[in-house]
Amino acid sequence: MASRKESATASTAVMAIPAGTLDSPVNQIQIEGLVVLKIIKHYQEEGQGSEVVQGVLLGLVVEDRLEITNCFPFPQHTEDDADFDEVQYQMEMMRSLRHVNIDHLHVGWYQSTYYGSFVSRALLDSQFSYQHAIEESVVLIYDPIKTAQGSLSLKAYRLTPKLMEICKEKDFTPEALKKANIGFEHMFEEVPIIIKNSHLINVLMWDLEDKSTVADKHELLNLSSSNHLEKSLQLLMDRVDDMSQDIVKYNTYSRNVSKQQQQKHQYVQRRTQENTQRQSRGEPALPEEDMSKMFKPPQAPPRMDTLLIAGQINNYCQNVKEFTSQNLGKLFMAEALQGHN
């Protein structure tokens, strides 16, 4: 999926021309209810299990508010469809929407996630491409697993200004990240979302709610935790293992750097003693040598992947916290009801 997303972002430079730029960042996102339904329908039709679905967000910018009024999905295709041009497909879709007088300005993209597993290098690179070309771009993350638990899970994220500067420089060394003071909590910023519906849709929703059965409303009080918590903890442990491996690599790098520094110090001392002896014998001193060529510094492991893993671990912990707090609330309420009876 990452390669398909990277090829799709190639057209953002063309689409960025009419969008314009703002002096102030986007502080709020307003989404039409129809867009939310399209995203949910896209996953139900093409997403299976951990399969990720993606699409384009269309809309306009009003002051510091980003209004998302339409969207369309990236088509699913196999490796056999070598002749399929995704950039051309997007341009044709936007051209068709413009002909029927529908908002066609490119304002971001959306992606589904599997148990909150969306913090990755592919998402970082794709969002950087969008946000670099279109300043107001956002990525919407839809979690169908959490939505199935009873509440819509749809969040909007943007890269922070600090991370944008690091990505522009493409310098992910430990020194650069330390200088920029970037941690996993400073990588993405969440933008609040407001879902807006027309008055007719609100009336329809009230009518549907009145016609819904009582049994459907009581499903949210189910005390079983299903396998959601177990799967989340398993994914969390996998990410912790990845973090441990990265820590081992960095510790090995630190030991190699320390060992090389000691070797350089010993070499300089031997060189100084030898020159002192040569001077005492009236011989010329040895010529100076380039230390950087003799002692090549070990290559530092990239730290961006470690930050992404830490961000994903934090996301898993937040999901577990939300899920367990809801279940504990149900259990305490059930205990109170039994005590009352």
Image (cartoon, helix red, strand yellow):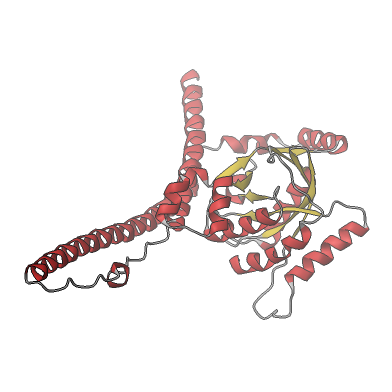
Please indicate, yes or no, whether residue 230 appears anywhere in the rendered image: no
When the figure is inspected, residue 234 is found, relative to residue 75, above or below; the finding is above
Q: Position of residue 196 (x, y in %)?
A: 78, 38
* Residue depicted at x 52% and y 57%: 120
The quarter of the image holding the N terminus is: bottom right
When the figure is inspected, residue 89 is found, relative to residue 124, above or below; the finding is below
* Residue depicted at x 73% and y 61%: 13
Which residue is at the far top?
340
Is 250 or 236 nearer to us in this picture? 250
Q: Is residue 148 left or right of residue 252?
A: right
Is 150 or 97 nearer to us in this picture? 97
Which residue is at the far right?
100
When the figure is inspected, residue 38 is found, relative to residue 294, above or below; the finding is above
Is 150 or 94 nearer to us in this picture? 94
When the figure is inspected, residue 58 is found, relative to residue 321, above or below; the finding is below
Which residue is at the far front?
282
Q: Position of residue 12 (x, y in %)?
A: 72, 61
Q: Position of residue 44 (x, y in %)?
A: 68, 57
* Residue depicted at x 24% and y 60%: 261
Q: Position of residue 336 (x, y in %)?
A: 48, 22
* Residue depicted at x 58% and y 57%: 168
Q: How many marks?
A: 0
Is 341 or 241 nearer to us in this picture? 241
Q: Quadrant of residue 219?
A: top right
Please indicate, yes or no, whether residue 104 appears anywhere in the rendered image: yes
